[in-house]
Image: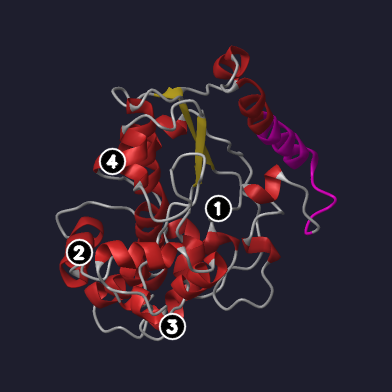
Amino acid sequence: MNFANFFGCDQRSDKMLDCLRGQDRNALMGKSRDRDLERNVQPYWFRPVVDRNLTSSGVLKDWPESLYRNGQFKKCSYMIGFTRNEGSLEYYLQKERADNRRTNEEKIAFLIRPFLKEWASEDVIATVINYQYFGKNFSRNALSSQFANGPQSIRNNAQFNSLNNQMPYQSGIQNNYQSNIAAGGGQEYQNDQILVELMGDFLYIAPSDFVARLHSMGGGKVWVYAFEFEGTRSLGPIQKNAKMISKQTYGVTHMDDMLYAFNTPYAPDAASTERTLSSTYARMFFELTRFGYIPDVYNSFYQWRQYLHHQPS
């Protein structure tokens, strides 16, 4: 309602939609990105569907979930990927402000707030998440993750499609914050790693699992992979003067894989292992685009398995 009111639209549902459809799309999307940084909240919840190929109207017509359930996407094959430490990019962006919160529940609520609908009970959600990730009865190692329910199935499946390396990049001297990573790190570091995992599950892994299931149930083909390679192109090593942040804290963060899928100016003289990885990785995109599926030669050699909703692991 507040979003529609900003554009001077009538708040009756039918009139409101007609009015918003007539607004400039750049203005709509620009306003939807407003954020109160101190409270870490986006005042306006506006998430339109904008694909004219799938809807009778360009925006504000159908919920994506309905489109999936009705099989509207089944002609398109999906390759869904995630990195080992998906949540670290968003978490370290917010860490300094999040650390000002008194309790763990308050910190979690602060981190997830921008992604909740305005009527959601963030306190209840934060309490449940806190128990799931930090509860005394929930065994969890900060560096050796276990995931529950939906995210578990997609991670199990993706392990077989893992792009990994055996000799991770070493960035040199470890700081006091990390406090001997080989032994698990200090308490703050361990807590941060759990929160990184939490954000990765919340923002990327669980939604990916949901989409993969819906697409597979609708008759679409899905391949899932995990990108775990740490190298000179990864985000951690190219950071400059970032306090308490390095390769070890970032891990393989969100979009790290894209630095290997495409040429980047950050590491033009990449090692041969990285060039081989990039070639293989880009080839997967090419094959899926060309054939609409991963050819059997890759399924056997690289162990790429098709994701099936009734047998996700």
Q: Are marks 3 and 2 in contact (CB under 8 Å)?
A: no
Q: Secondary structure at mark 4?
A: helix
Look at the magenta stretch and give its main secondary structure: helix
For the residue marked with disc 4, what is the amino acid?
Gly
* Element carrying mark 2: helix
Give the Cα distance between marks 3 and 2: 21 Å
- The N terminus appears in which quarter of the rendering? bottom left
Circle nearer the viewer, 3 or 1: 3
Instruction: Work out which residue is located at the far right of the displayed protein and give it.
Output: 269
Residue at the disc numbered 2: 125
The colour scheme is secondary structure
For marks 1 and 4, the one nearer the N-term is 4
**Mark number for residue 150?**
4
| Sequence order check, earlier mark of 4 and 3 | 3
* Residue 254 against residue 110 in the figure, above or below: above
Badge 3 vs badge 1, beta-carbon distance below 8 Å: no
Residue, disc 3: 37
Q: First in sequence: mark 3 or mark 1? A: 3
Regarding residue 223, the answer to whether it shows in the image is: yes
**Label 3 amino acid?**
Leu
Q: Quadrant of the C terminus?
A: top left
Q: How far, Cα to Cα, is label 2 from label 1?
A: 27 Å
| Start-end of magenta stretch | 266-283
- Residues at discs 4 and 3 in contact (Cβ within 8 Å): no
- Pointer 2 local density, CA inside 10 Å: few below 14, some 14–19, many at least 20: some
Numbered circle sitting on residue 252: 1
Residue 138 has which mark? none
